[in-house]
Amino acid sequence: MTSPPEEGGHDHEHDHDTNGQDTDSVSSTSSNRDDVAQFSVPEMDCPSCAGKVKNSVRKLDGITTVDPQVTTGTLSVSYERSQTSPDEIADRVKKAGYTVEYQGETTAAFTVPEMDCPSCAGKIENALDDLPGLSSYETQPTTGKVVTTYDDDSTSPSKITDAIESAGYEVTDSTANDANTAESSTDERENVWTSSRAIKTWISGGLVALGLLFEFFLTGQNVLVAELVGRELLVADILFLGAVGIAGQIIFRNGYYSALNRNLDIDLLMSIAISGAIIASLVFGEALYFEAATLTFLFSIAELLERYSMDRARNSLQELMDLSPD
Protein backbone atom coordinates (compact mmCIF):
# COMPACT_ATOMS: atom_id res chain seq x y z
CA MET A 1 0.00 0.00 0.00
CA THR A 2 2.06 2.95 -1.22
CA SER A 3 1.16 6.43 -2.37
CA PRO A 4 3.07 9.63 -3.10
CA PRO A 5 2.84 12.39 -0.56
CA GLU A 6 -0.30 14.45 -0.83
CA GLU A 7 -0.14 16.82 2.11
CA GLY A 8 2.95 18.02 3.86
CA GLY A 9 5.82 16.01 2.33
CA HIS A 10 8.32 14.18 4.44
CA ASP A 11 10.57 17.05 5.43
CA HIS A 12 13.30 16.79 8.00
CA GLU A 13 12.91 20.06 9.87
CA HIS A 14 12.81 18.37 13.23
CA ASP A 15 14.78 17.58 16.32
CA HIS A 16 15.83 13.98 16.91
CA ASP A 17 15.39 13.82 20.64
CA THR A 18 15.60 10.65 22.64
CA ASN A 19 11.90 10.37 23.32
CA GLY A 20 10.53 8.86 20.14
CA GLN A 21 7.00 8.26 21.31
CA ASP A 22 4.03 10.63 21.50
CA THR A 23 0.80 9.41 22.90
CA ASP A 24 -2.58 11.10 22.92
CA SER A 25 -4.27 9.50 25.90
CA VAL A 26 -7.81 9.43 27.22
CA SER A 27 -9.52 7.87 30.18
CA SER A 28 -8.92 4.15 30.65
CA THR A 29 -12.63 3.51 30.90
CA SER A 30 -13.18 4.79 27.37
CA SER A 31 -10.19 3.10 25.75
CA ASN A 32 -11.17 -0.26 27.16
CA ARG A 33 -14.18 -0.20 24.84
CA ASP A 34 -12.28 0.60 21.61
CA ASP A 35 -10.68 -1.42 18.84
CA VAL A 36 -6.98 -0.96 18.20
CA ALA A 37 -5.39 -0.97 14.74
CA GLN A 38 -1.66 -1.11 14.15
CA PHE A 39 0.13 0.31 11.10
CA SER A 40 3.67 0.18 9.77
CA VAL A 41 4.94 3.68 8.87
CA PRO A 42 8.66 3.19 8.14
CA GLU A 43 9.26 6.82 7.08
CA MET A 44 8.02 8.14 10.43
CA ASP A 45 11.44 8.36 12.06
CA CYS A 46 11.32 11.48 14.26
CA PRO A 47 9.02 13.36 16.68
CA SER A 48 8.17 15.92 13.98
CA CYS A 49 7.01 13.14 11.64
CA ALA A 50 5.03 11.58 14.47
CA GLY A 51 3.34 14.91 15.20
CA LYS A 52 2.20 15.33 11.60
CA VAL A 53 0.83 11.78 11.48
CA LYS A 54 -0.98 12.22 14.77
CA ASN A 55 -2.53 15.55 13.80
CA SER A 56 -3.72 14.10 10.49
CA VAL A 57 -5.28 11.00 12.05
CA ARG A 58 -6.99 13.02 14.79
CA LYS A 59 -9.09 14.79 12.16
CA LEU A 60 -11.20 11.63 11.92
CA ASP A 61 -14.24 11.15 14.12
CA GLY A 62 -14.14 8.28 16.61
CA ILE A 63 -10.39 8.39 17.25
CA THR A 64 -9.63 7.72 20.92
CA THR A 65 -5.84 7.47 21.11
CA VAL A 66 -3.01 7.91 18.62
CA ASP A 67 0.31 6.36 19.58
CA PRO A 68 3.11 6.92 17.01
CA GLN A 69 6.22 4.95 17.93
CA VAL A 70 9.17 6.49 16.15
CA THR A 71 11.76 3.94 17.26
CA THR A 72 9.86 1.07 15.60
CA GLY A 73 8.12 2.98 12.82
CA THR A 74 4.71 1.78 13.92
CA LEU A 75 1.45 3.54 14.66
CA SER A 76 -1.17 2.26 17.08
CA VAL A 77 -4.62 3.84 16.92
CA SER A 78 -7.60 3.21 19.21
CA TYR A 79 -10.88 3.97 17.48
CA GLU A 80 -14.62 3.43 17.63
CA ARG A 81 -15.53 1.09 14.81
CA SER A 82 -18.97 2.67 14.44
CA GLN A 83 -17.39 5.99 13.38
CA THR A 84 -14.26 5.08 11.44
CA SER A 85 -12.23 2.18 10.06
CA PRO A 86 -8.58 1.12 9.58
CA ASP A 87 -8.77 2.04 5.88
CA GLU A 88 -9.81 5.61 6.72
CA ILE A 89 -7.01 5.85 9.28
CA ALA A 90 -4.46 4.61 6.73
CA ASP A 91 -5.75 7.19 4.24
CA ARG A 92 -5.15 9.99 6.78
CA VAL A 93 -1.58 8.77 7.33
CA LYS A 94 -0.96 8.87 3.57
CA LYS A 95 -2.39 12.39 3.42
CA ALA A 96 0.25 13.40 5.95
CA GLY A 97 2.85 12.37 3.36
CA TYR A 98 3.86 8.91 4.55
CA THR A 99 3.59 5.46 3.10
CA VAL A 100 1.65 3.11 5.35
CA GLU A 101 0.83 -0.54 5.62
CA TYR A 102 -2.06 -1.78 7.73
CA GLN A 103 -0.87 -4.76 9.72
CA GLY A 104 -4.36 -6.23 9.99
CA GLU A 105 -4.22 -6.74 13.74
CA THR A 106 -6.96 -5.93 16.21
CA THR A 107 -6.82 -5.77 19.99
CA ALA A 108 -9.85 -6.87 21.99
CA ALA A 109 -10.50 -7.56 25.67
CA PHE A 110 -12.65 -10.47 26.85
CA THR A 111 -14.29 -10.47 30.27
CA VAL A 112 -13.80 -13.78 32.09
CA PRO A 113 -15.06 -13.25 35.67
CA GLU A 114 -14.30 -16.82 36.80
CA MET A 115 -10.59 -16.37 35.99
CA ASP A 116 -9.52 -15.21 39.43
CA CYS A 117 -6.15 -16.87 40.05
CA PRO A 118 -2.87 -17.67 38.23
CA SER A 119 -3.93 -21.31 37.88
CA CYS A 120 -7.09 -20.28 36.03
CA ALA A 121 -5.04 -17.95 33.83
CA GLY A 122 -2.64 -20.78 33.06
CA LYS A 123 -5.42 -23.00 31.72
CA ILE A 124 -6.67 -20.20 29.46
CA GLU A 125 -3.14 -19.50 28.24
CA ASN A 126 -2.67 -23.16 27.33
CA ALA A 127 -5.90 -23.05 25.32
CA LEU A 128 -4.88 -19.84 23.52
CA ASP A 129 -1.40 -21.14 22.67
CA ASP A 130 -2.86 -23.45 20.02
CA LEU A 131 -5.00 -20.76 18.35
CA PRO A 132 -3.62 -19.64 14.95
CA GLY A 133 -3.63 -15.95 14.12
CA LEU A 134 -3.25 -14.84 17.73
CA SER A 135 -0.12 -12.70 17.89
CA SER A 136 -0.22 -11.90 21.62
CA TYR A 137 -2.41 -12.19 24.68
CA GLU A 138 -2.38 -11.09 28.31
CA THR A 139 -4.38 -12.71 31.09
CA GLN A 140 -5.33 -10.42 33.97
CA PRO A 141 -6.78 -12.37 36.92
CA THR A 142 -7.05 -9.22 39.04
CA THR A 143 -9.49 -7.65 36.56
CA GLY A 144 -10.93 -10.85 35.11
CA LYS A 145 -9.95 -9.90 31.54
CA VAL A 146 -8.03 -11.48 28.69
CA VAL A 147 -6.53 -8.90 26.30
CA THR A 148 -5.68 -10.32 22.88
CA THR A 149 -4.09 -9.03 19.67
CA TYR A 150 -4.99 -11.07 16.61
CA ASP A 151 -4.88 -11.12 12.82
CA ASP A 152 -8.34 -10.42 11.39
CA ASP A 153 -7.63 -12.65 8.39
CA SER A 154 -6.64 -15.69 10.46
CA THR A 155 -8.95 -15.67 13.45
CA SER A 156 -11.97 -13.90 14.93
CA PRO A 157 -13.40 -12.92 18.33
CA SER A 158 -15.75 -15.91 18.24
CA LYS A 159 -12.82 -18.31 17.83
CA ILE A 160 -11.00 -16.67 20.73
CA THR A 161 -14.15 -16.95 22.83
CA ASP A 162 -14.45 -20.65 21.93
CA ALA A 163 -10.82 -21.22 22.92
CA ILE A 164 -11.32 -19.56 26.31
CA GLU A 165 -14.53 -21.50 26.94
CA SER A 166 -12.78 -24.74 25.95
CA ALA A 167 -10.63 -24.17 29.03
CA GLY A 168 -13.81 -24.20 31.15
CA TYR A 169 -14.40 -20.47 31.63
CA GLU A 170 -17.36 -18.41 30.47
CA VAL A 171 -16.81 -15.22 28.48
CA THR A 172 -19.46 -12.71 29.60
CA ASP A 173 -18.43 -9.71 27.52
CA SER A 174 -16.00 -8.58 24.85
CA THR A 175 -14.90 -5.25 23.40
CA ALA A 176 -15.10 -6.95 19.99
CA ASN A 177 -18.91 -7.06 20.22
CA ASP A 178 -20.78 -4.66 17.97
CA ALA A 179 -23.55 -4.11 20.51
CA ASN A 180 -23.13 -1.73 23.38
CA THR A 181 -22.61 -4.13 26.24
CA ALA A 182 -20.97 -1.80 28.71
CA GLU A 183 -23.31 -2.76 31.49
CA SER A 184 -21.78 -2.92 34.90
CA SER A 185 -20.89 -6.26 36.42
CA THR A 186 -20.82 -4.87 39.95
CA ASP A 187 -24.21 -6.33 40.87
CA GLU A 188 -23.06 -9.71 39.58
CA ARG A 189 -19.98 -9.59 41.71
CA GLU A 190 -21.90 -8.66 44.83
CA ASN A 191 -24.06 -11.80 44.50
CA VAL A 192 -21.31 -14.37 45.04
CA TRP A 193 -23.13 -15.84 48.04
CA THR A 194 -26.38 -16.31 46.11
CA SER A 195 -24.82 -17.62 42.90
CA SER A 196 -25.56 -21.04 41.44
CA ARG A 197 -22.39 -22.49 42.92
CA ALA A 198 -23.16 -20.98 46.33
CA ILE A 199 -26.64 -22.50 46.35
CA LYS A 200 -25.22 -25.92 45.50
CA THR A 201 -22.65 -25.47 48.27
CA TRP A 202 -25.34 -24.66 50.86
CA ILE A 203 -27.38 -27.71 49.80
CA SER A 204 -24.25 -29.85 50.02
CA GLY A 205 -23.55 -28.52 53.51
CA GLY A 206 -27.09 -29.35 54.58
CA LEU A 207 -26.71 -32.93 53.33
CA VAL A 208 -23.40 -33.28 55.18
CA ALA A 209 -25.06 -32.07 58.39
CA LEU A 210 -27.93 -34.54 57.94
CA GLY A 211 -25.46 -37.33 57.25
CA LEU A 212 -23.63 -36.54 60.46
CA LEU A 213 -26.94 -36.55 62.32
CA PHE A 214 -27.76 -40.07 61.11
CA GLU A 215 -24.16 -41.25 61.53
CA PHE A 216 -23.69 -40.24 65.18
CA PHE A 217 -27.05 -39.39 66.73
CA LEU A 218 -29.87 -41.18 64.89
CA THR A 219 -27.97 -44.43 64.59
CA GLY A 220 -31.15 -46.45 64.86
CA GLN A 221 -32.57 -44.79 61.74
CA ASN A 222 -29.30 -45.14 59.82
CA VAL A 223 -30.55 -48.24 58.01
CA LEU A 224 -29.50 -49.99 54.84
CA VAL A 225 -30.90 -48.27 51.77
CA ALA A 226 -29.17 -49.89 48.80
CA GLU A 227 -26.22 -51.90 47.61
CA LEU A 228 -23.71 -50.76 44.99
CA VAL A 229 -21.03 -53.09 43.57
CA GLY A 230 -21.58 -55.33 46.56
CA ARG A 231 -21.17 -52.56 49.13
CA GLU A 232 -23.92 -51.57 51.58
CA LEU A 233 -25.08 -47.98 51.50
CA LEU A 234 -26.73 -46.62 54.63
CA VAL A 235 -28.83 -43.45 54.89
CA ALA A 236 -25.83 -41.41 55.98
CA ASP A 237 -23.76 -42.76 53.08
CA ILE A 238 -26.46 -41.74 50.57
CA LEU A 239 -26.57 -38.25 52.06
CA PHE A 240 -22.79 -37.92 51.85
CA LEU A 241 -22.79 -39.10 48.23
CA GLY A 242 -25.54 -36.57 47.47
CA ALA A 243 -23.39 -33.81 48.94
CA VAL A 244 -20.49 -34.85 46.71
CA GLY A 245 -22.72 -35.02 43.64
CA ILE A 246 -24.24 -31.56 44.14
CA ALA A 247 -21.22 -29.47 45.19
CA GLY A 248 -18.70 -31.56 43.29
CA GLN A 249 -20.12 -30.85 39.82
CA ILE A 250 -18.11 -27.68 39.27
CA ILE A 251 -15.01 -29.21 40.88
CA PHE A 252 -15.03 -32.23 38.56
CA ARG A 253 -15.83 -29.98 35.61
CA ASN A 254 -12.85 -27.73 36.30
CA GLY A 255 -10.69 -30.77 36.97
CA TYR A 256 -11.66 -32.20 33.58
CA TYR A 257 -10.65 -28.99 31.79
CA SER A 258 -7.40 -28.88 33.79
CA ALA A 259 -6.54 -32.38 32.58
CA LEU A 260 -7.61 -31.48 29.04
CA ASN A 261 -5.25 -28.48 29.04
CA ARG A 262 -2.42 -30.41 30.76
CA ASN A 263 -2.49 -28.15 33.80
CA LEU A 264 -1.82 -29.73 37.19
CA ASP A 265 -3.75 -27.34 39.45
CA ILE A 266 -5.86 -27.47 42.61
CA ASP A 267 -9.07 -28.36 40.73
CA LEU A 268 -7.48 -31.45 39.21
CA LEU A 269 -5.88 -32.47 42.52
CA MET A 270 -9.15 -32.07 44.43
CA SER A 271 -11.02 -34.03 41.77
CA ILE A 272 -8.51 -36.86 42.14
CA ALA A 273 -8.74 -36.75 45.95
CA ILE A 274 -12.55 -36.86 46.03
CA SER A 275 -12.70 -39.56 43.38
CA GLY A 276 -10.09 -41.56 45.26
CA ALA A 277 -12.16 -41.46 48.45
CA ILE A 278 -15.29 -42.63 46.61
CA ILE A 279 -13.42 -45.41 44.80
CA ALA A 280 -11.77 -46.57 48.02
CA SER A 281 -15.21 -46.71 49.65
CA LEU A 282 -16.89 -48.68 46.87
CA VAL A 283 -14.02 -50.95 45.84
CA PHE A 284 -12.11 -51.55 49.06
CA GLY A 285 -14.89 -51.00 51.59
CA GLU A 286 -13.09 -48.22 53.48
CA ALA A 287 -16.30 -46.16 53.99
CA LEU A 288 -14.78 -42.76 53.25
CA TYR A 289 -18.05 -41.15 52.15
CA PHE A 290 -17.96 -38.63 54.99
CA GLU A 291 -14.39 -37.60 54.12
CA ALA A 292 -15.28 -37.15 50.45
CA ALA A 293 -18.36 -35.06 51.28
CA THR A 294 -16.51 -32.89 53.79
CA LEU A 295 -13.66 -32.32 51.34
CA THR A 296 -16.11 -31.29 48.63
CA PHE A 297 -18.07 -28.92 50.87
CA LEU A 298 -15.03 -27.21 52.43
CA PHE A 299 -13.28 -26.76 49.10
CA SER A 300 -16.44 -25.19 47.63
CA ILE A 301 -16.53 -22.78 50.57
CA ALA A 302 -12.87 -21.91 49.97
CA GLU A 303 -13.57 -21.22 46.29
CA LEU A 304 -16.47 -18.92 47.17
CA LEU A 305 -14.30 -17.02 49.64
CA GLU A 306 -11.58 -16.62 47.02
CA ARG A 307 -14.13 -15.36 44.48
CA TYR A 308 -15.59 -12.91 47.01
CA SER A 309 -12.15 -11.52 47.89
CA MET A 310 -11.18 -11.18 44.24
CA ASP A 311 -14.44 -9.43 43.36
CA ARG A 312 -13.91 -6.91 46.15
CA ALA A 313 -10.44 -6.19 44.79
CA ARG A 314 -11.83 -5.80 41.27
CA ASN A 315 -14.51 -3.42 42.46
CA SER A 316 -11.89 -1.31 44.24
CA LEU A 317 -9.74 -1.21 41.12
CA GLN A 318 -12.72 -0.21 38.99
CA GLU A 319 -13.58 2.60 41.37
CA LEU A 320 -10.01 3.90 41.14
CA MET A 321 -10.17 3.74 37.34
CA ASP A 322 -13.46 5.65 37.36
CA LEU A 323 -11.82 8.38 39.47
CA SER A 324 -8.86 8.81 37.13
CA PRO A 325 -8.87 12.08 35.12
CA ASP A 326 -9.37 12.13 31.36
Image (spheres, helix red, strand yellow):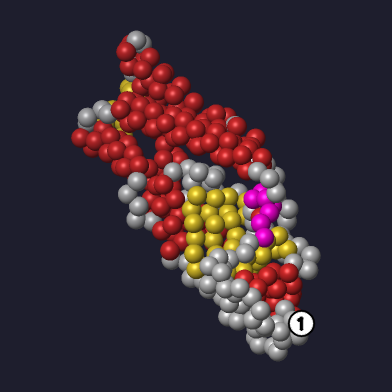
In terms of depth relative to the viewer, which is nearer, 98 or 300? 98
Which amino acid lies under the numbered mark 1 shown in the image of this protein? Glu
Residue sitting nearer the eye, 261 or 128: 128
Side of 298 where 131 appears, left or right: right
Q: Secondary structure at mark 1?
A: loop
Residue that badge 1 annotates? 7
In the displayed structure, 1 sits above or below 65; it is below
Q: Residue at x 40, y 47 (%)?
A: 119
Q: Is residue 249 above or below residue 156?
A: above
* Corner quadrant of residue 223: top left
- Reply yes or no: does residue 139 show up in magenta: no
Q: For the point 38% across and 56% down, which residue is it? A: 261
Q: In the depicted view, which residue is nearer to us: 1 or 162?
A: 1
Residue 4 percent across, percent down from the top left: 70, 89
Please say whether residue 74 is visible from this viewpoint: no
Quadrant where the image shows the N terminus:
bottom right
Q: How many numbered marks appear?
A: 1
* Rendered residue at 47%/66% (across/down): 131
Q: Residue at x 51, y 32 (%)?
A: 308
Please rate how many residues cluster around mark 1, counting C-alpha atoms within 10 Å: few if below 14, some from 14 to 19, many from 20: some
Residue 44 visible in the current orientation: yes
Q: Which residues are magenta?
A: 24-30
Q: Is residue 85 left or right of residue 120?
A: right
Return the x and y of residue 289 as percentages of the image width and height. Answer: 31, 28
The magenta stretch spans residue 26: yes
Q: Where residue 171 appears, x then y in whole percent?
A: 57, 51
